[in-house]
Image (spheres, rainbow, N blue to C red):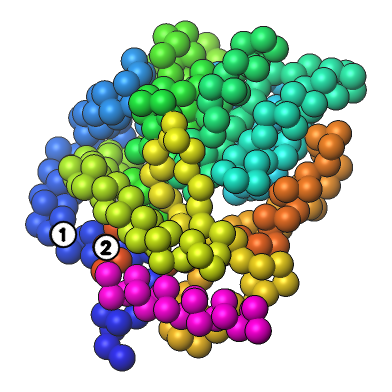
């Protein structure tokens, strides 16, 4: 086996080869002008991002986690406030709520899309009120790249008077009812972690909003609560800026992004066509397009470890998102949760399996993954 035969979950080298000298030129331009903090590439990137997301304001941040955290601070969340989050997500979704001093309230997800379930959310809001925890914000997560059901969620939130903070860390590039991710909540947060659909070479993120007052607050909060001149500090803030170097890298990568989203869609379709008879393949709602951060299937209960080990022996890596839901992690065990419990979350935690997936996965590698998986799944039914 040569090095190029090694299958990776995400292969960033292929993209780097494609970007070629453009990347070096962009990085060297920053080294030359020397404005490493809030340099011209940052504003250029923010203009391009807000255009893409069809919102008035895009604010880059030091990470997706910081974008979520700054958004919660901008929404003025405080002690005792209930913030509704799924448990079947990356821990950052809930940790920012606790860091902001509020209470993460865990809501169950849908079996088909793995995204927040509106019925579980409605029950949770009622339960929170009864517990004396004022409901303030809901944080739908666009899991694995597919936007949550924003029609249902926004409608409910309007009735209840809650803000929607979309955790779009995995879904930038996706859409809902023809509207791009970034424009679907009161505030949207995304991540540019290297393995996300649009990733930089380090940590990075962004927050999007159409609300000028929220944009102004977030802009100040990421700069220690002050203005750009660092003279007046009206809010208690922090340092949550994106490095100019990372902005320059993202500008390069943005030029390939549409092409890569297209490739992701094609590969996902190929996987699904080949696997749908034997495994639970991802379900994308009619109104949605996914950014395909992950390609995640459902395997029969109790067989995941063996399937993973079969695939490992065939040289195929897999990953499990998320084997331990957040409500079972030590700091969150006492946090309130949906009165109906989290049965779907529990079930998904035992049965999801993510396959190698990135825009540069060639068709022979896709076939290798499919063949090994189908062989292993045959073992399940025997
Ligand atoms: C990656 C991720 C985050 C955090 O993003 P970072 O840039 O790594 O801080 C938050 N939420 C979800 C759902 C994620 O997948």
The part of the chain drawn in magenta is 363-382
Q: What count of labels does the image hold?
A: 2
Which of the marked residues, 1 or 2, is nearer the chain's N terminus?
1
Disc 1 versus disc 2: nearer the observer: 2
Specify few, some or many for label 2: CA neighbours under 10 Å numbering under 14, 14-19, or 20 or more: some
Of residue 107 and residue 92, the one placed in the foreground of this image is: 107
Q: Is 48 displayed left or right of 297 in the figure?
A: left
Of residue 18 and residue 121, the one placed in the foreground of this image is: 121
- Secondary structure under the numbered disc 2 in the rendered image: loop
Tell me if residue 191 comes above or below residue 153 in the rendering.
below
- Look at 25% across and 44% down and name the residue there: 257
Q: Position of residue 88 (x, y in %)?
A: 66, 47
Tell me if residue 196 comes above or below residue 148 in the rendering.
below
Specify few, some or many for label 1: CA neighbours under 10 Å numbering under 14, 14-19, or 20 or more: few
Of residue 374 and residue 101, the one placed in the foreground of this image is: 374
The residue labelled by disc 2 is: 360
- Look at 42% across and 9% down and name the residue there: 212
Tell me, yes or no, whether the two marked residues, 1 and 2, touch with CB atoms within 8 Å: yes
Q: CA distance from mark 1 to mark 2?
A: 10 Å
Tell me if residue 147 comes above or below residue 373 in the rendering.
above
Tell me if residue 111 comes above or below residue 269 in the rendering.
above
In the picture, the disc for residue 18 is 1
Q: Is 252 displayed left or right of 324 in the figure?
A: left
Q: Position of residue 242 (x, y in %)?
A: 37, 37
- Look at 57% across and 77% down and name the residue there: 377
- Secondary structure under the numbered disc 1 in the rendered image: helix
Can you tell which quarter of the image residue 319 is in? bottom right
Q: Position of residue 278 (x, y in %)?
A: 54, 68
From where the camera sits, is residue 332 visible? no
Q: Is mark 1 within 8 Å of ligand 1?
A: no
- Look at 64% across and 72% down and name the residue there: 304
**Which quadrant would the N terminus be assigned to in this image?**
bottom left
């Amino acid at each position: 086996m040569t090095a190029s035969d090694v299958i990776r979950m995400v292969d960033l080298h292929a993209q780097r080869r494609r970007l070629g000298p453009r990347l070096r030129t962009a990085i060297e331009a920053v080294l030359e002008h020397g404005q490493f903090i809030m340099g011209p590439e940052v504003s250029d990137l923010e203009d391009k991002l807000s255009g893409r997301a069809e919102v008035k304001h895009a604010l880059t941040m030091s990470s997706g986690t910081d974008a979520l955290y700054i958004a919660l601070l901008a929404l003025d969340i405080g002690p005792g406030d209930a913030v509704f989050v799924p448990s079947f997500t990356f821990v950052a979704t809930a940790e920012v709520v606790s860091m902001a001093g509020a209470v993460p309230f865990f809501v169950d997800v849908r079996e088909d899309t793995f995204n927040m379930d509106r019925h579980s959310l409605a029950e949770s809001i009622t339960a929170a009120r009864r517990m004396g925890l004022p409901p303030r914000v809901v944080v739908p997560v666009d899991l694995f790249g597919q936007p949550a059901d924003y029609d249902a969620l926004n409608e409910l939130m309007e009735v209840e008077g809650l803000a929607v903070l979309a955790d779009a860390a995995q879904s930038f590039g996706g859409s809902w009812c023809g509207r791009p991710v970034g424009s679907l909540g009161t505030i949207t947060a995304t991540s540019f972690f290297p393995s996300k659909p649009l990733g930089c070479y380090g940590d990075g993120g962004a927050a999007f909003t159409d609300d000028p007052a929220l944009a102004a607050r977030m802009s100040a909060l990421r700069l220690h609560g002050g203005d750009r001149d660092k003279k007046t500090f009206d809010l208690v803030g922090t340092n949550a800026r994106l490095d100019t170097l990372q902005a320059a890298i993202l500008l390069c990568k943005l030029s390939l992004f549409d092409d890569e989203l297209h490739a992701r869609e094609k590969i996902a379709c190929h996987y699904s066509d080949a696997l749908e008879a034997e495994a639970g393949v991802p379900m994308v709602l009619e109104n949605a397009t996914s950014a395909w951060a992950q390609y995640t299937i459902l395997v029969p209960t109790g067989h995941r470890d063996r399937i993973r080990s079969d695939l490992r022996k065939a040289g195929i890596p897999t990953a499990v998102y998320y084997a331990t839901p957040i409500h079972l992690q030590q700091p969150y065990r006492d946090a309130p949760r949906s009165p109906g419990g989290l049965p779907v979350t529990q079930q998904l935690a035992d049965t999801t399996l993510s396959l190698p997936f990135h825009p540069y996965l060639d068709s022979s590698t896709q076939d290798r993954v499919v063949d090994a998986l189908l062989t292993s799944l045959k073992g399940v039914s025997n």
